[in-house]
Amino acid sequence: MRFTAPLSNGPGTDAEYRGHMTDRTDKNTRYLAIFSDGPLEGTTETRLLENGEYDHRIGAAAHVDNSDALFWYRATGDREVAGEKHVTYAFEPEDSDPVSTNGEVDSLSF
């Protein structure tokens, strides 16, 4: 996650904001989520560890063929690659909105 400094509207200078609003994540606080199947198959996403743990379940809101859908993924395993944690997620169709498409999927995970 990257924060940008506000423009000069308010107290302080841009230089003061830049010193505090930076991306302070490193490979010990983030992991790579790999979606192995379902509508997000083949996509990856960098996520933050929470208290040193990865999310065991991820919900992804997506816009597919002009409609919104919610997809659920469950972690199926993790491994270390070059010092970074990689977590594989499998699609949970029974808990997800039904979608049948050959088109593009725009998503936002949470």
Image: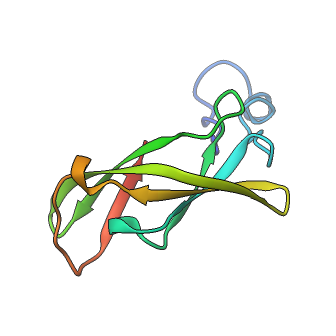
Q: Is residue 86 visible?
A: no
Q: Give the vertical position of 2 relative to 67 (above or below).
A: above
In the shown orientation, is residue 61 left or right of residue 110? Answer: left
Camera-side residue of 41 and 66: 41
Camera-side residue of 63 and 90: 90
In the shown orientation, is residue 89 left or right of residue 30? Answer: left
Residue 24 position, x and y percent, is: 77, 39
Q: Give the vertical position of 61 relative to 106 (above or below).
A: above
Residue 79 position, x and y percent, is: 72, 57
The extreme top residue here reads: 11
Camera-side residue of 7 and 66: 66
In the shown orientation, is residue 47 left or right of residue 83? Answer: left
Residue visible at 39% across and 52% down in the picture: 108
The extreme right residue here reads: 83
Residue visible at 61% across and 37% down in the picture: 7
Residue visible at 43% across and 41% down in the picture: 110
Residue 107 position, x and y percent, is: 36, 58
